[in-house]
Image (spheres, grey):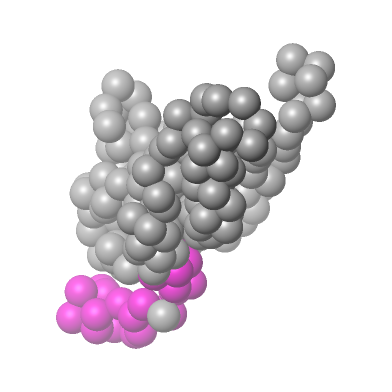
Amino acid sequence: MTYASIKDEPRHYIRVTPFGRFAEVARANLAMMEEFEMKIPPEVPFSGEDGSPEWEAWMLRQHDASPLEEKVAQHGAITIVCACAAAEFYINDAAARLLGDTYFENHVDRLELLSKWVLVPRLATGHQLDRGGQAYERLKALAGARNDLMHPKSRDGSGEGVITAMSKKNRIAESARQAVEALDLLRPEAKAFDPHGVHDFNL
């Protein structure tokens, strides 16, 4: 868990926040994902007829790589979901503290993650999240990657799920790296409008 510093907290009490734990899990799974990535054998061109040495080499590579690629996808997915949870827990906590529980419940709680990060800083202190900046773009990508994982839909009528398509093109791994980058980029944004809050997200 993450604890607010007494000297930085104007009301002089310690608050326990859940977003640091989610961010910690996200970072740990990103590290595990990258360890498995390094173990995946290099690609072998698919060539030759069935039973040929080239075909056998390709099949052997697929046999060795498949369980490792599955681990990459699993840890990448956990990274994305937990990073998104950290970002949402933080902005919800900030909204409740800075705007009041009633306002949060009535006007903020049901908004999408990106909208919360745009609206809450502006209402709290007038701080604007730059919609052309990296933090905004990474947060938008994080929310999209999380939605793809949690709400898969078929593509082009083929019946192939989004998770399967992402795994095949290694998009989960790239999205996982960008998910942790999003947390790093959101830290200065959080400090700008919530200077007395807890900003570590395991950040």
Q: How many marks?
A: 0
Q: Nearer the viewer, residue 124 or 137?
A: 137
Residue at 52% from the left image edge and 55% from the top image edge: 64
Res 125 quadrant in image: top left
Where residue 82 appears, as percent x and y from the top left, is 51, 59
Task: Decide whether residue 9 is among the magenta residues.
Answer: yes
Residue at 28% from the left image edge and 63% from the top image edge: 203
Question: Which residue reaches farthest front?
Answer: 52
In this rendering, does residue 117 appear at all? no
Where residue 189 appears, as percent x and y from the top left, is 27, 45
Question: Which residue reaches farthest left?
Answer: 7
Q: Nearer the viewer, residue 59 or 94?
A: 59
Res 9 quadrant in image: bottom left
Q: From this view, report whether residue 81 is shown above or below residue 144.
A: below
Where residue 59 appears, as percent x and y from the top left, is 58, 43
Q: Is residue 193 left or right of residue 145?
A: left
| Magenta-drawn segment | 2-26
Q: From this view, report whether residue 40 is shown above or below residue 149.
A: below
Residue at 33% from the left image edge and 55% from the top image edge: 38
Task: Decide whether residue 84 is among the magenta residues.
Answer: no
Q: Is residue 153 left or right of residue 101?
A: right
Q: Nearer the viewer, residue 68 or 93?
A: 68
Identify the image quadrant of the N terminus: bottom left
Res 151 quadrant in image: top right
Q: From this view, report whether residue 8 is shown above or below residue 85.
A: below
In this rendering, does residue 127 appear at all? yes
Q: From this view, report whether residue 35 is shown above or below residue 137.
A: below
Where residue 22 appears, as percent x and y from the top left, is 47, 66
